Image: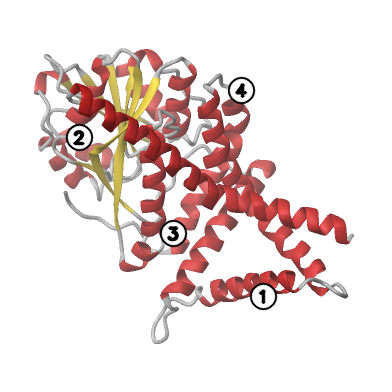
């Protein structure tokens, strides 16, 4: 038992450490090497390395799925009017997916858009299928009803498609949120954005943010009705078809995070369910070896890591409490227990004694890992739904 516990402990600890520490370090080293080589070539050739504006801007079809988004639509419609893109080259399509509020009525009165009203809610995937069927331009751009785009965001995305090798371009997302979510989800998102930027520089971009990404029309394939992670599946399909996926940090969008860890937990459960449901299809997709390494390191191991936490704790307890157990095992067990105690202390969030920042951050980490366990249970029990639900605590703002 002692030997088996040691194997379990070091495998679980190694997997978690690789996914969250060593892979980012290896990614940074590779990124630094590639960037240095590019800078050296630039000094010798003096060529502009940025994607430049094409002689004529291509036509874009902007597809927006909306379900009960009436409170966000005034800001969204005003934001669309501020976009800096040739009017004759831009088609805006809203799909009201069985909305029960004033979404459809507001959109019917809006000028310069095309509206598709689906009488019954079928989920975001079916709404996107309907929107793309209406699209008439060679480039598709997907964004959300609550997402606000920078005025030049569409130009930043479109300029990359002058290269016929490019199949999808991912925009950069910033979250507007409460003070609490800035300390938790906000910090994690900055870390995640850095990883995405480095992967993009290495040509191994994996996923887009559903808030803003563009796709070459020929890369589109209709989505299954129960698809949840469209922003993961669609770019990966483009990669499997032999096209490059790019990330443009200058194509900026703003979305609104859940105001609390509890609200973010609900979103993570949905992401987890979609991740596990799409796993088999993603693994069968043909892709370059380095992209598959990134898929395993950045995605798959993170999906597995939550299940390693209880194994790590149990194996550590066996080794630390065994007669003659090494002191290192006892130190590690004490560190784990301190983390869980801190996380449970972080559940307290209301005055007069709100939880300290470090405790709230520990609670966030534990809750997000627990969300993946809940997501897998929902998939196995058949209780996951192919519809998107916005956390009720989302906030609103302008760009």
Image spot of residue 88 (x, y percent):
11, 18
The disc, 2 or 3, on the residue closer to the chain's N-terminal end is: 2
Please say if 16 is above or below 54.
Answer: below
Q: Nearer the viewer, residue 61 or 96?
A: 61
The disc, 4 or 2, on the residue closer to the chain's N-terminal end is: 2
Question: How far separated are the C-alphas under marks 3 and 1?
Answer: 30 Å
Number of the label disc, if any, that sits on residue 334: 1
Please tell me how many numbered marks the rendered image carries. Answer: 4
The disc, 4 or 1, on the residue closer to the chain's N-terminal end is: 4
Question: How far separated are the C-alphas under marks 1 and 2?
Answer: 49 Å
| Secondary structure state at the residue bearing disc 3 | helix
The disc, 4 or 3, on the residue closer to the chain's N-terminal end is: 3
Q: Residue at x 20, y 30 (%)?
A: 156
Number of the label disc, if any, that sits on residue 65: none
Question: How far separated are the C-alphas under marks 2 and 3?
Answer: 28 Å
Please say if 94 is above or below 338.
Answer: above
Q: Residue at x 49, y 57 (%)?
A: 265
- Kindly indicate the quadrant of the structure image that contains residue 324: bottom right
Q: Nearer the viewer, residue 209 or 20?
A: 20
Are circles 4 and 1 on residues that touch, CB within 8 Å? no
Answer few, some or many: residues within 10 Å of disc 2's Cα (few below 14, many 20 plus, some between 14 and 19).
many
Q: Can residue 114 be seen in the rendering of this structure? A: no
Question: How far separated are the C-alphas under marks 4 and 1?
Answer: 42 Å
Dot in front, 4 or 1: 1
Are circles 3 and 1 on residues that touch, CB within 8 Å? no
Q: Give the residue number, with chain letter if any, for mark 3.
A: 263
Q: Give the residue number, with chain letter if any, for mark 2.
A: 153
Question: How far separated are the C-alphas under marks 4 and 3?
Answer: 33 Å
Q: Residue at x 46, y 67 (%)?
A: 361
């Amino acid at each position: 038992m002692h030997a088996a516990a040691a194997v379990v402990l070091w495998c679980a600890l190694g997997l978690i450490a690789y996914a969250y520490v060593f892979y980012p370090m290896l990614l940074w080293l590779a990124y630094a090497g590639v960037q240095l080589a590019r800078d050296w070539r630039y000094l010798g050739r003096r060529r502009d390395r940025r994607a430049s504006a094409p002689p004529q801007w291509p036509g874009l079809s902007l597809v927006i799925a909306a379900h009960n988004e009436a409170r966000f639509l005034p800001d969204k419609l005003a934001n669309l009017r501020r976009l800096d893109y040739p009017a004759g080259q831009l088609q805006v399509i809203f799909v009201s997916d069985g909305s029960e509020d004033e979404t459809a009525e507001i959109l019917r009165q809006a000028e310069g858009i095309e509206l598709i009203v689906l009488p019954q809610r079928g989920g975001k995937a079916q709404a996107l299928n309907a929107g793309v069927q209406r699209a008439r331009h060679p480039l598709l751009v997907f964004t959300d009803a609550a997402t606000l785009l920078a005025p030049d965001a569409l130009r930043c995305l479109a300029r990359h498609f002058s290269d016929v090798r490019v199949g999808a371009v991912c925009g950069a997302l910033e979250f507007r949120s409460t003070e609490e979510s800035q300390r938790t989800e906000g910090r994690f998102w900055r870390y995640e954005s850095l990883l995405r930027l480095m992967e993009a520089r290495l040509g191994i971009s994996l996923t887009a943010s559903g808030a803003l990404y563009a796709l070459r029309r020929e890369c589109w394939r209709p989505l299954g009705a129960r698809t949840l992670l469209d922003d993961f599946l669609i770019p990966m399909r483009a990669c499997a078809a032999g096209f490059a996926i790019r990330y443009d940090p200058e194509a900026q969008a703003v979305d609104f995070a859940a105001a609390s860890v509890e609200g973010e937990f609900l979103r993570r459960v949905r992401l987890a369910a979609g991740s596990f449901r799409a796993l088999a299809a993603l693994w069968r997709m043909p892709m370059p070896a380095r992209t598959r390494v990134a898929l395993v390191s950045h995605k798959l191991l993170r999906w597995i890591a939550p299940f390693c936490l209880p194994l790590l704790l149990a194996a550590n307890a066996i080794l630390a409490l065994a007669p003659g157990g090494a002191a290192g095992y006892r130190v590690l067990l004490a560190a784990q227990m301190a983390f869980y105690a801190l996380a449970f202390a972080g559940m307290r969030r209301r005055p007069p004694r709100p939880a300290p920042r470090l405790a709230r951050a520990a609670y966030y980490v534990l809750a997000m890992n627990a969300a993946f366990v809940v997501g897998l249970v929902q998939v196995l029990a058949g209780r996951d739904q192919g519809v998107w639900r916005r956390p009720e605590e989302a906030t609103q703002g302008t760009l």
